[in-house]
Amino acid sequence: MTTERDLTRREFVAAATAIGAGGLVAAPALGRTTGSGRADPIRVGIIGCGGRGSGALIQALKADPGSVLWAMGDLYPERIEPCLGYARSAMEEQDEEQGTSRYAQKIQAEPERRFSGFDAYAKVIDSGVDMVILTTPPVFRPQHLAAAVNAGKHVFCEKPVAVDAPGVRSVLESARIAKEKGVSLMSGFCWRYQLQMREAFDKLQGGGVGDIRTIQSTYNATGWVQPKERKPAWSETEFQTRNWHYFHPISGDHIVEQAVHAIDWIGWALGDKSPQRCWAVGGRQTREDLPQTGNVYDHFSVTYEFAGGVRAYHMCRHWPNSPYDNSGYVTGSDGVMTIDAWNGNHVIEGANPWKGTAPANDMYQQEHDELFASIRSGKPINDGVAMSSSTMMAIMGRMAAYTGQAVTWEQAMNSQENLNPGPWAFGDRATPPVALPGTTRLI
């Protein structure tokens, strides 16, 4: 995806059409196959061995009888052994439950295939894996994804997929290459793999509330993980990467890293159409002013404007001692849908009342079940467009709040603001200031 000239909304749609916005079927998947799909073991490499990565790894190993853990990589070596131990324990539990010994045999990541450092991702990709799990901090996602798809690997790519517009453009190009090579690319936008949510959004897209007029979504939480105080031996780069949630060049800020799930609902309801523009407010009202809490805000409120006068409103915050709320409301010409995601209670009130009946499921496991089924069948999934669009919506909301300016889709997509311009290495690193609306520039 070139950055030499502006990328218009029409051109984004054209690129999306070329990649395929849904569950894409492309050429037979790469690798050793029997008939139209794979019959041999699928060697899994994990890049990012923290909590989310460990969970995704277990789901990948449960998803397919022939999936095996082959290689592991993380920036910090001390994270690899706990992840490995967790995987081994989970597989032993599976064997105990089912009276077998085959799950324990899935752990095949020998010491020579456990890597650390900023180049660990490349070593994992080059170790003979067939599929990689990308669960590092978001800033690294575009680079790791590009390396994986260029090497012909299937990918599970956790959300968000980037922290800035250059990263999103890179991910769109990687999605195109994934289609060209016939490899699966699945995103970590897990609600799209939750059966009750699928039923609800199918109903919306089938006209369940008539013509959609407005959408409201929230992701109001009490806070993130506990930040880590600086240790004397840490360089500034190590300090920030160990507290990556709290530095927006690494996390994207909480609207991009966390609340993007609820922004994804907006895009999903509207068929992943791009907004025309947005404006926003945000700030840092209750977050403690400590070095380890970085420069991120603790609240955002964004208004997105779409073609035809459709508007979407999103709010997210991290305020202690405040109610948690992660819900959605879609108002149409014939009714209103209430989305109660975590309880699975989705209803429409209006001209055509409706209540969802789909069963609950483990959406995290469902993702990997469908991913590995696509690899086996030789019919790749490609979530590239939807995951890029939702991530970009979150980024443009942050840009609007940070600058105090209305931001168009074209301005956001073509932004040249690279939040991490240099090569990664331990040592000195600039500490970004807290954004000040009206002063912080739109780049």
Image (tube, rainbow, N blue to C red):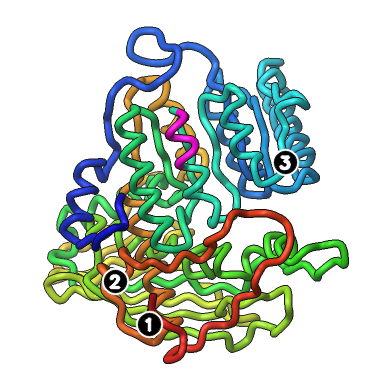
Looking at this view, name the residue that lies furthest to the bottom. Answer: 438
Quadrant for residue 178, please give it: top left
Query: Does the magenta segment cover residue 329?
Result: no
* Image x and y of residue 276, in percent: 22, 71
Residue 152 x/y as whole percent: 44, 28
Which of the pair 357/155 is nearer the observer? 155
Q: Residue 227 location in percent, x, y? A: 73, 69
Q: Which residue is mark 2?
A: 411
The residue sitting at 31% across, 34% down in the picture is: 179
At 39% from the left and 62% from the top, the residue drawn is 165
| Residue furthest to the top | 34
**Amino acid type at mark 3:** Ser
- The quarter of the picture where the C terminus appears is bottom left
**Vertical placement of residue 126 versus 66, above or below:** below
Q: Is residue 362 visible?
A: no
Residue under pointer 1: 280
Residue 98 placement, left or right of 179: right
Number of marks in the rendered image: 3
Mark 1: amino acid:
Ala
Dot 3: few (<14), some (14–19), or many (≥20) neighbours within 10 Å? many
Tell me the CA gap for discs 1 and 2.
Answer: 15 Å
The magenta segment is 146-151
Tell me the residue at 60%/76% (across/down): 432
Q: Main secondary structure of the magenta part?
A: helix
Q: Is residue 178 visible?
A: yes
Residue 149 in magenta? Answer: yes
